[in-house]
Amino acid sequence: MKAKVADGIMAGAIYMPSIFQRFVPKPGEGPSREDMESGYLTLYGLGVMKAKDGDKTTKIKTKFHFNKDTAYLYTAALLVETGMTMLTKSSSLPGGVLTPASALGSDLTQRILQEMDTTWELEEVKEDDGEEKTEAEGETSGGADDKKDEDTK
């Protein structure tokens, strides 16, 4: 049922665009340059690494911080950095449809850290006497220091 409703809305947007145009931003609408410059995105991740033999596990946590608005300012920059990484790895890429992570892996992450105003942190989560403690394993910075204490804006 939901699929039919979605199909109907999509068909209406294609065949009767004048009805749906009031819901679509017009050129020039959107956030101000000041808002884009002060915006940011912080992504957190948790993971478990397992040894090849499967006996030992290590918990990790990560933080990836973009120091500007990713929705507007960094969209084009991320596309360019992805394209540049593809150019350098083009001879080793397999054919077919791939996600950026499966095709470019850590090479793309390293390029983003090097070329853009971003930071990445990786920590091992240590469990000791029932309390979780963290120990910084390393930090890589690609630009300005992480100036913002808030996680969302």
Image (cartoon, rainbow, N blue to C red):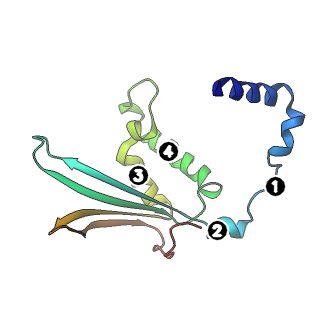
Residue 71 relative to residue 140: left or right: right
> Which quadrant is home to the C terminus?
bottom right
Residue 74: quarter of image: bottom right
Image quadrant where residue 19 sits: top right
Amino acid type, mark 1: Gly
Query: What residue did someone put label 1 on?
Result: 28
Q: What whole-number distance in Å separates the C-alpha atoms at marks 1 and 4?
A: 26 Å
The Cα atoms of the two marked residues, 3 and 4, are separated by 9 Å
Crowd rating for badge 3 (residues with CA inside 10 Å; few <14, some 14–19, many 20+):
some
| Amino acid type at mark 2 | Glu
Which residue is located at x 64 percent, y 68 percent? 37
Q: In the visual, does 31 lie left or right of 40?
A: right
Sequence-wise, the earlier of marks 2 and 3 is 2
* Sequence order check, earlier mark of 3 and 4: 4
Q: Which mark is residue 37?
A: 2
Q: Is residue 62 above or below residue 27?
A: below
Q: Which residue is mark 3?
A: 109
Q: Are marks 1 and 3 in contact (CB under 8 Å)?
A: no
State the residue position of label 4. 82
Mark 3: amino acid:
Thr
Q: In the rendered image, which quarter is residue 6 located in? A: top right
Foreground: disc 1 or disc 4: 1
